[in-house]
Image: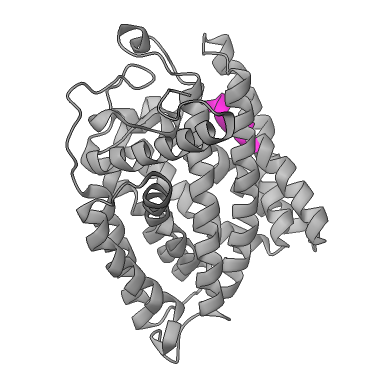
């Protein structure tokens, strides 16, 4: 694993940089949205399968059936997310299309408020109008983006981006449940428990591959165009974003300071805007760039607001204690603000599970 030969911070930044290139590579592939999603996931499957097999042979835990199916269901939502994201990129550009999708932070808390009756934290309340104002500038809503706003249809791109954020939020919720379903032990037993990182990613990617194929046929959206260099870009997208990027981040985060994890949230959208500027020649207007700055500032405020720590934080998979007792997908340690974010995510899924099965929503899945 590359992260073993470099510092955790360097590995995490490298992983975030890989993910930052996603939208740019999707644009360079220049093919239909369904082919882009299918190629990204299908090319990643053999690599993730080999990594998952190696993980099992090194003594990694076996995923129970419930975790596998939750991960696959999460992948179906990821497929919808990737397809809709392609349309957002076409309408507003690779860089701005990536920034808009970070609204999933607000969507998680909104779901917690509507479903669980949990009032949002003060930091999120303060960040929401800032992020929404930035969103209006990015999309040129009401003419705020200026007459030279970048994108063929910036307003439609923002609408697509909000849809992408919703689908991505559901994907994260389900993936979080998949990773926690086989790591419910706490105390001393949890210290020796490891998370099947590659296994969960493999199952989710398998679900995304199947979901992309079904949606592609349903939408009549399979148009490859020129096989080369399209397939080459899709292969690079699969290896960098779907495999290397997420593995580097997942493995390195448990060894990083909490402040570094919060800062990493800004690397992907900021990096995507920079890469699209240099590689694709995308030139957002000054007001749109101001909107980007507002969205990123709001994101930082939303996830960095401290919450009261639990008196006894449970151990994360792999033995790492997470501040606030929460663990990000794949066992990544969360900051206090992120701890509240993931705690809300898990409670939403437990509430939904209890409503559908008739069991108490307060029990562990």
- Res 7 seen here: no
* Quadrant in which residue 300 is drawn: bottom left
Q: Residue at x 38, y 78 (%)?
A: 137
Task: Give the side of residue 193 with respect to residue 9, left or right.
Answer: right
Task: Give the side of residue 101 with respect to residue 85, left or right.
Answer: left
- Res 344 seen here: yes
Task: Give the side of residue 365 with respect to residue 290, left or right.
Answer: right
Residue 325 placed where, x, y %? 28, 28
Residue 104 placed where, x, y %? 43, 54
The magenta stretch spans residue 57? no
Most foreground residue, 181 or 235: 181
* In the image, farthest residue toward the bottom: 147
Judged by its main secondary structure, the magenta piece is helix
* 247 vs 52: above or below: below
Colouring style = one colour
Task: Give the side of residue 365 with respect to residue 285, left or right.
Answer: right
Instruction: Count the marks.
Output: 0
Residue 247 placed where, x, y %? 48, 33
Q: Residue at x 20, y 49 (%)?
A: 305
Residue 4 placed where, x, y %? 39, 24
Most foreground residue, 161 or 349: 349
* 256 vs 232: above or below: above
* 360 vs 281: above or below: above
The magenta span reads: 198-205
* In the image, farthest residue toward the front: 358
* Quadrant in which residue 201 is drawn: top right
The magenta stretch spans residue 200? yes
């Amino acid at each position: 694993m590359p992260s073993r030969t470099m510092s955790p911070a360097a590995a995490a930044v490298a992983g975030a940089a890989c993910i930052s290139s996603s939208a740019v590579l999707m644009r360079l592939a220049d093919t239909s949205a369904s082919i882009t999603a299918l190629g990204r996931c299908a090319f990643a499957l053999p690599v993730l399968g080999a990594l998952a097999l190696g993980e099992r042979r090194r003594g990694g835990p076996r995923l129970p059936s419930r975790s596998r199916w939750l991960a696959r269901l999460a992948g179906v939502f990821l497929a919808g997310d990737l397809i809709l994201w392609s349309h957002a990129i076409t309408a507003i550009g690779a860089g701005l299309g990536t920034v808009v999708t970070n609204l999933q932070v607000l969507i998680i808390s909104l779901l917690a408020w509507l479903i669980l009756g949990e009032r949002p934290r003060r930091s999120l309340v303060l960040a929401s109008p800032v992020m929404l104002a930035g969103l209006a500038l990015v999309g040129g809503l009401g003419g705020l983006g200026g007459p030279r706003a970048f994108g063929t249809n910036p307003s439609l791109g923002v609408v697509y981006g909000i849809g992408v954020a919703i689908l991505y939020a559901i994907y994260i919720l389900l993936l979080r449940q998949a990773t926690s379903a086989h790591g419910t032990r706490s105390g001393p037993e949890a210290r020796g428990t490891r998370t099947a990182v590659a296994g969960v990613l493999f199952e989710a990617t398998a679900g995304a591959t199947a979901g992309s194929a079904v949606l592609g046929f349903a939408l009549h959206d399979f148009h490859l165009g020129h096989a080369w260099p399209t397939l080459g870009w899709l292969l690079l997208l699969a290896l960098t974003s779907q495999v290397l990027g997420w593995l580097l981040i997942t493995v390195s985060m448990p060894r990083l300071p909490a402040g570094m994890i919060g800062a990493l949230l800004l690397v992907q959208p900021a990096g995507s805007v920079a890469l699209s500027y240099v590689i694709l020649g995308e030139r957002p207007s000054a007001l749109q760039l101001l909107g980007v700055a507002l969205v990123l500032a709001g994101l930082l405020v939303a996830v960095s607001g401290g919450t009261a720590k639990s008196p006894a934080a449970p151990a994360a998979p792999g033995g790492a204690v997470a501040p606030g007792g929460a663990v990000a997908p794949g066992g990544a340690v969360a900051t206090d603000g992120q701890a509240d974010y993931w705690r809300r995510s898990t409670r939403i899924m437990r509430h939904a599970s209890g409503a559908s099965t008739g069991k108490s929503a307060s029990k562990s899945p």
